[in-house]
Image (cartoon, rainbow, N blue to C red):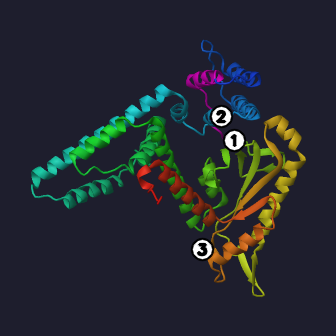
Amino acid sequence: MPNFRSSPSLLDLVEEARKLTEHASVREQIDAVLHIMGGASTYRYGAGKPLVHALEDVARESLLHEDFALAKRFQRFAGYARGELFLEVVENYYDERARQRSEKYMRRMVSMGAERAVAVLDRLCAENPDASAADANALFRGIVRSTEHLGIGDEEGGIQLPAKYLKRLQEYGHMELVLRNLPRPASAETARMVNDALADADAGMLAHLLELRARRAALAALRTAVDDPDSSESALHTCLKNQEWIFGGAYVAELARRQYTPDTILDIPLLRGDGSLHVVELKRARIENLVIRRSGHLMLGAPVHQAVSQTQNYLRTLDENRHPIHGTYGVDTRRASATVVIGHPQYVRGSIAPQEIAETLRTYNTHMARVEVITYKTLLESAERMLALSSAEQDPASTEDTTT
């Protein structure tokens, strides 16, 4: 059952967002949200489906006017109202003061950790003046291993973790993404230079850094799910939710709504820059008969043809209902395209090499107009290349001048 939520903070965010559009129809939809929630002096706990639907309506109306940033903002508001996002996450996107408080808290936590590390090293040196870097390394590794045995417990006498601590754990997770690949100063001077660099760092650069770390974590989670032969379609879908970047730079957002007709529920509906729809259909990674050999020739197995037929039916239904869908949701489904992600070469039987699988799929796709079939291996490798390019663009030192 959804855990619908609302708060005065969300009310403030919605009121601020209203100032960002000049389109009367979008403002009318935002006013409908404010009516459900009440004004600043008459705020009421306007949770439930009406609030979620009203927020989604603002996102839809924004899409009609090609204001993708505002649409994404209200999709996140709706995610909070549905109970899918913590308020702190939404505030970190759109509330400058809240973001500054969160950053101050994270910096303080890092500082406290560094102070504790210095104290531990001082104690080590006092007890063992001849201690080496290897000794310090072993000491801290032991500390890390010991923390893995700490727990809260779920038997009698166990502790129920309050929601505020769950939120802190989420913040720690984001903080770890940033800190994991920070440079390790080799001297006090280097440490001072790193500190100065971070103090003067451009906010956009740091935001880009955080995004890269988050994407690497998402990609690692997807790879783990793919490598698990028992992973369900639902598990893979969870890893790919709100990760539209994995499918390429042509898509500006994953749409919050997955159902546009009564008999069609899409796995991942992506929005192109021109406002048109792209459908991603997910199947399991473990497909043993992804490619089969018959009479000496390679061909795709039955699961691929079934997945493609299912996707073609989705596209046909979207074509037939394009006018009411565009009028109601602001999404252009005429001649929508689709990608089917299915299988991985590591699970295919019959001594068929990955290159042979890739060639068989390439041959098949050249005869298809609106549907492309790819494996999770192809998806992962493509995303890895995108991350590598993004990292190279962020680090000018990694780009060498090859002109002659």
Hey, which quadrant is residue 398 in on the image?
bottom left
The answer to whether residue 270 is left or right of residue 161 is right
Q: Which residue is mark 1?
A: 256
> Is disc 1 in contact with disc 2, using a CB cutoff of under 8 Å?
yes
**Residue 267 shown in magenta:** no
Percent position (x, y) of residue 74? 65, 32
Q: Nearer the viewer, residue 383 or 159?
A: 383
Q: Which residue is mark 3?
A: 346
* Amino acid type at image mark 3: Gln
Percent position (x, y) of residue 318? 84, 48
- From what the image shows, is residue 65 above or below residue 227? above
Residue range highlighted in magenta: 1-19
Q: Which residue is mark 2?
A: 78
* Amino acid type at image mark 2: Ala
- From what the image shows, is residue 403 above or below residue 323? below
Q: Looking at the figure, which quarter contains the N terminus?
A: top right
- From what the image shows, is residue 391 above or below residue 357? above
